[in-house]
Image (cartoon, rainbow, N blue to C red):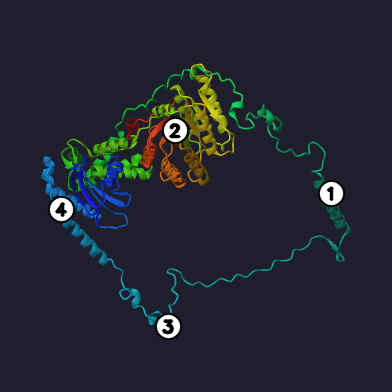
Amino acid sequence: MLDFFAIFSKGGIVLWYFQGTSQLFTPSINSLIKTVILQERSGNNSFTHEALTLKYKLDNEFELVFVVGYQKILQLSYIDKFLSDIQLEFRNKYKDDIQNGKMSRNLDFSDVFHLVLKQREEESRVEKVRRTMRSFEDSKKSQKTVSSMVEKKGDEKKPTKAKGKENKPVKTVTIKEPEPVQDTSPVVNGSLDEETLRKNREKFFEKMQGGKKAKSSPKSTTPEGKKKGKIGRVWDGAGNNKDIKNLDFSSANGDSSQVPDEEVVPSIAERSLVGSMKGSIKDIEEEEEEEDYEEEMNQTASKGNAKSSAKSGGSGMFSMFKNLIGSKTLTKDDLDNALEKMKDHLVSKNVASDIAVKLCDSVAAKLEGRTLGTFNTVAHTVKTALNESCVQILLPKRRIDILRDAMEAKQQKRPYTITFCGVNGVGKSTNLAKICFWLVENGFRVLIAACDTFRAGAVEQLRTHTRKLNALHPSVNGDGQHMVKLYEKGYGKDAAGIAMEAINYARDYHIDVVLVDTAGRMQDNEPLMRALSKLIRVNQPDLVLFVGEALVGNEAVDQLTKFNKALIDHSASENPRVIDGIILTKFDTIDDKVGAAISMTYTTGQPIVFVGTGQTYTDLRNLNAKAVVSSLLK
């Protein structure tokens, strides 16, 4: 039932393997190593590759990996116990050879392997027999007969009285009829006297005249009687419907070349930015690492050890000393206290909760069975392992060099295209302008495609950025050609069509880079996600960048997952385009709560290409993995 079983070292040396089928299992193991083990994602000991399910176990003491593979449709309940048994048998048999480094000889492990496999399969078979469903005769329902379910009159249950309550007699309340009201007005021979009749007439006339006055009061023409309604405030230079023609700066056909360019004079501060971003972008500065988190974890670990030592009669001080000194093999119980504190710390630093749990599980799998060095605390060991795991996650798995790729596309006489996407209000247009400034600083001519045809003011925002950038960099070699151009077709148009026309325009007029700005959309809006997928499918940009905020926590995972899923679902090709990289904005507003960087990178496996750290054109940085992890563990 098993397709293969392999035992190899973390250095890549295969010590022993078993193959149950003729199918090659090398691609599956290579995918496991590349996707899980090297990227520190070993929290869950299960991995799926094509039609196979791979279960693995790490032996951190001897640096070994045990992997078993079987068909995905099979449900084998004994695999986890089988892996543990094989690990113990292999360690016991070849412990001395592993420690002395004599692993070059052929290992005769087949007999032990087949014996343990046979025992576990037999136990699983017996367990399935025990779990078989009971027959109807064995159930309690079969003991019920028709006669036992018929209720007899004599066996009727009497109503039980509530405890502590007695039946009290109901009080009867007699309702008295209201006495007639006596009229005190004087009556003469069964009728009212003349004086009373006169007074009643006067009162009647007064009521009638008062009602007429009340009805006629709204019709009074006096200015004091008029009721004033709300009057709209008139702002200076606001204009009205008659001024629409004077205020409309867009052309009839949407051609931006007909829009009059106002002369923009950059300030002294803006002129000082010119020439500051030539070459590669600077990294985020690394802050000095503080030890508060480590001391807090040490206290947590020492409290846990103090509790265990108190049961055995030891004092807290000696238990902490015992934790500090000696070569101790770490177990799961030793790591629980420090890992729980670490998980709470990661969540407080804005790491998504499920990502924090996976990171803790990965660290536990990495450290369990490892020997604790002399004068090393559990907390320090856990922190070091977490530091290595987070740095490994943040390091890019593939090269993204925009300047080199744009230069290569320029030599091929085609424009290099970058598409920006993301949710509403994260700063797509602002960071597009920053990247445009960086490209212009390095001598590239840029065309901005205004494909946000939904948000009011989106085109005008890009037009303002275009004028400012052209004011800072007037022309190339004095030939009068603008460094930055805007391609727009107004509002309400098809974004995919505008992007295609912009790319063709850039190819015809020899523009080096095309930056495609798209409308912000929520990840649950299916029509807009379908439109984004169409734009990417039709134009096939060189780079698709997701722009996300550094302020979000769990929402980052949901956004990235659903954006990728929408791009895959709405694509007709076998190899659909997904997000290639991430731009993390508003990084200067979060202090040390940098967990969104970990959450986004862990979710997609794609690198963070740029980090936005402010509102000027030069506030763009590369991600420094060590600096982010230092802030995360501070």
* The C terminus - image quarter: top left
N-terminal of the pair, mark 3 or mark 4, is 4
User: Total label count?
Assistant: 4
Q: Amino acid at mark 3?
A: Lys
Which residue in the protein does label 2 denote?
585
Left or right position of 350 against 52: right
N-terminal of the pair, mark 3 or mark 1, is 3
The residues bearing labels 4 and 2 have C-alpha atoms spaced at a distance of 56 Å
Left or right position of 436 against 625: right
Rendered position, 164 above or below 83: below
Q: Is residue 142 visible?
A: yes
Circles 3, 1 touching at the beta carbon (< 8 Å): no
As drawn, the label of residue 43 is none
Q: Amino acid at mark 1?
A: Gln
* Mark nearer the viewer, 1 or 2: 2
- Asked where in the image residue 316 lies, by quadrant, the reply is top left
N-terminal of the pair, mark 4 or mark 2, is 4
x, y percent for residue 351: 37, 40
Circles 4, 2 touching at the beta carbon (< 8 Å): no
Which residue in the protein does label 1 denote?
209
Left or right position of 155 against 96: right
* Mark nearer the viewer, 3 or 1: 3
Front residue (pair 153, 284):
284
As drawn, the label of residue 152 is 3
